[in-house]
């Protein structure tokens, strides 16, 4: 039991250490990496099974009682995020066996990849805000290594922008943690949730909340802090871009949801309108950015930003339905977005380029690829009965219920523009005739082809499954949302039923 | 530029003295200032002296394994130090255990020490990976 709670941290850590030990032997690294990703998914599923009734699992690292030690807290929301992380790790581990895998593995892909997963899983498991900062740093360092894996000029340029902007974000985070500790005398989420409403200087606390919003917003690529994302993602190699697109921004979103439903919930009246404005601005700028680009990877990168806006609606409205919509949207988005990046890699392999102007005619030669592309593309745009439709439906309905009609209207308009960019990719890559001087397809063997297509087909199948069998996914999202809004249960689970007054509130 | 004769001759001293001190600091860290991190830095300092005096290849021979491997071994040792806690029911991961066997003197043994040794190796590996990359970059720049 205690081991299961830390398994999502230990498995990637073990995998990173073992693959580092066999640095020059990719043939040994690969089975370790695959086994670790599969084990992570298994452990996360077990955690999901144990939390599905709304239970909150807690272990105190090293038996140091909360709020002094580091608590590992896994509630339903954490478990959902861990399952989706395990799924993505497995899909990308398989995909990474595809083209150019030898060069990637020799450059250290495997240890860095598992370090990244370690940071992501740590962020989803921790119950301590300073520990969350540490996991953010682990993620940042690993992701920088992954971003510049091929050591090209383009990658270093994108990588440095990525690191500088993210370092500013994490510095803000550290400042905010320091101020928060000064105000409350504690760093444990549960203890913070208990003490924050009683802090006398609520103005300073709101300022800390804004600092945290900036820090997490930089990570989540919110408006206006999204510039690093399109600058960096399109330079990365495809498996790396896929795992980044799937998980990195979502860790920021997770942190926002966790902190603002738990610690700053009593300030919802102040933060709600801020979140609404940021969510709408993020949706609109992202989708407009995507509309003007003609490189598949850039279009997809801007769409990540746009979609983050939808996920914020939950914390903006703070109703159970809105938060459930956010959770459902995150799950749908991670699967679909990763799949689209995997597909972009496959399209490049089949045509030789990412530039839409230079490629074409794929529908004639690769109809299966076309179908596989249409599933996540239409899902992203929110066409029924695919998963994106349900995500958008819940988000828009919660907007209508909260009488934020303009929010619902903008969310619908952004959906139409999303459809426009997806149709643009479809028209250019699949529909139009191949340009005369187009590039030639890259060579690959049957094994690499299988490694590329297997995760694409599996994730496409999952998108359809969520679309057709929405009931259980929606039910679990609502359960998770209700558990997120029940702060007393979280506090009691971590600190025990009669929490001692350990931390003193300073006047 | 070749390092001066005195530096080259005293290289072994500059290597082993910091390493012995680092081991002392590592063990002392249990109850007093010190520990795996600072000990690892001291040991890596010794290896850095050696790589300046005798060249990065000689420093790599002293390390025997690659710096990345030392990192990996350190992480594995630290990871394993948390596992004995799980033998007792209901204990959390990384709960440390202590033994005081009496063999003439009382030996203070603990899993916390194992954890510190893991940190020690990891720091040696990380720091030497960093400076060996820099020293080797310098050498290759010289020859070009």
Image: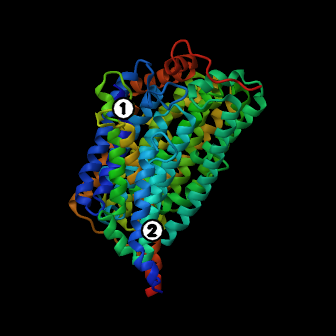
- Quadrant of residue A191 within the rendered picture: top right
For disc 1, the chain is: B
Question: Residue A399, image x and y in percent?
Answer: 63, 28
Instruction: Judge from the rendering whether residue B40 lies leftward or rightward of residue A305; answer left or right.
Output: left
Relative to B9, say whether A155 is above or below: above
For label 1, count other residues whose C-alpha is less than 10 Å away and answer few (under 14), some (14-19) or many (20+). Answer: few
Q: Is residue A426 visible?
A: no
Q: Is residue A32 visible?
A: yes
For label 2, count other residues whose C-alpha is less than 10 Å away and answer few (under 14), some (14-19) or many (20+). Answer: many
Q: Which mark is residue B98?
A: 1
> What residue would you read off at disc 2?
B48
Q: Nearer the viewer, residue A166 or B95?
A: B95
Relative to A373, say whether A499 is above or below: above
Quadrant location, the C terminus of chain B = bottom left
Q: Nearer the viewer, residue A292 or A277?
A: A277
For disc 2, the chain is: B
Question: Residue A88, image x and y in percent?
Answer: 38, 44
Name the residue at 53% across, 39% down: A132
**Mark earlier in primary sequence (2, 1):** 2
What distance separates the C-alpha of mark 2 from that of mark 1? 35 Å
Instruction: Determine the secondary structure under disc 2.
Output: helix
Instruction: Determine the secondary structure under disc 1.
Output: strand
Relative to A22, say whether B82 is above or below: above
Relative to A205, say whether A365 is above or below: below
Name the residue at 53% across, 62% down: A159
């Amino acid at each position: 039991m205690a081991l299961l709670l830390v398994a999502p941290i230990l498995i990637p850590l073990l995998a990173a250490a073992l693959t580092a030990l066999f640095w020059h032997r990719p043939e040994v690294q690969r089975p370790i990496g695959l086994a670790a990703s599969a084990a992570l998914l298994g452990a996360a599923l077990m955690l999901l099974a144990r939390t599905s009734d709304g239970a909150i699992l807690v272990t105190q690292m090293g038996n140091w009682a909360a709020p002094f030690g580091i608590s590992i807290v896994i509630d339903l929301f954490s478990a959902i995020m861990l399952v989706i992380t395990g799924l993505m790790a497995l899909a990308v581990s398989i995909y990474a066996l595809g083209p150019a895998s030898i060069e990637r593995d020799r450059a250290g892909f495997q240890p860095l990849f598992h370090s990244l997963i370690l940071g992501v899983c740590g962020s989803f498991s921790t119950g301590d805000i300073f520990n969350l900062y540490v996991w953010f740093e682990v993620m940042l360092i690993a992701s920088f290594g992954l971003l510049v894996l091929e050591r090209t000029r383009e990658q270093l340029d994108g990588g440095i922008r990525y690191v500088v902007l993210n370092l500013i974000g994490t510095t803000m985070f550290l400042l905010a943690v320091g101020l928060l500790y000064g105000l409350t005398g504690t760093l444990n989420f549960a203890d913070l949730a208990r003490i924050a409403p009683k802090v006398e200087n609520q103005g300073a606390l709101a300022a800390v909340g804004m600092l945290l919003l900036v820090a997490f917003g930089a990570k989540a690529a919110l408006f206006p802090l999204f510039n690093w994302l399109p600058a960096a993602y399109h330079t990365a190699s495809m498996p790396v871009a896929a795992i980044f697109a799937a998980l990195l921004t979502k860790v920021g979103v997770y942190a926002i949801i966790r902190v603002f439903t738990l610690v700053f919930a009593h300030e919802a009246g102040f933060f709600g309108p801020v979140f609404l404005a940021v969510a709408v601005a993020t949706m609109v700028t992202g989708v407009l950015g995507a509309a003007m680009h003609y490189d598949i990877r850039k279009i997809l990168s801007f769409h990540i930003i746009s979609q983050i806006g939808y996920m914020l609606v939950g914390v903006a409205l703070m109703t159970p339905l809105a938060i459930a919509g956010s959770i459902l949207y995150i799950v749908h988005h991670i699967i679909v977005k990763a799949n689209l990046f995997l597909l972009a890699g496959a399209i490049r392999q089949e045509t030789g380029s990412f530039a839409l102007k230079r490629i074409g005619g794929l529908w004639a030669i690769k109809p299966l690829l076309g179908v596989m592309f249409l599933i996540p593309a239409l899902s992203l745009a929110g066409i029924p009965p695919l998963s994106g439709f349900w995500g958008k439906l819940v988000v828009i309905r919660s907007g209508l219920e909260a009488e934020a009609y303009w929010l619902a209207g903008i969310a619908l308009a952004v959906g139409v523009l999303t459809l426009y960019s997806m149709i643009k990719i479809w028209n250019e890559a699949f529909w139009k005739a191949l340009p005369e001087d187009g590039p030639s397809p890259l060579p690959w063997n049957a094994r690499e082809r299988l490694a590329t297509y297997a995760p694409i087909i599996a994730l496409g199948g999952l998108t359809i499954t969520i679309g057709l069998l929405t009931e259980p996914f929606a039910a679990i999202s609502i359960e998770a949302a209700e558990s997120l809004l029940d702060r007393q249960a979280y506090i009691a689970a971590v600190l025990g039923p009669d929490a001692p007054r350990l931390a003193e509130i300073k006047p | 530029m070749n390092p001066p004769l005195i530096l080259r001759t005293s290289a072994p001293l500059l290597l082993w003295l910091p390493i012995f001190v680092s081991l002392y600091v590592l063990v002392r860290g249990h109850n007093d200032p010190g520990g795996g991190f600072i000990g690892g830095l001291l040991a890596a300092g010794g290896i850095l002296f050696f790589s300046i005096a005798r060249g990065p290849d000689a420093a790599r021979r002293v390390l025997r394994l690659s710096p990345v491997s030392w990192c990996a071994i350190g992480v594995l040792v630290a990871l394993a130090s948390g596992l004995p806690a799980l033998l007792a029911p209901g204990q959390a991961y990384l709960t440390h255990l202590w033994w005081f066997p009496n063999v003439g003197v009382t030996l203070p043994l603990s899993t916390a020490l194992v954890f510190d040794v893991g940190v020690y190796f990891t720091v040696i590996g990380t720091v030497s990976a960093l400076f060996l990359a820099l020293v080797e970059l310098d050498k290759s720049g010289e020859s070009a």
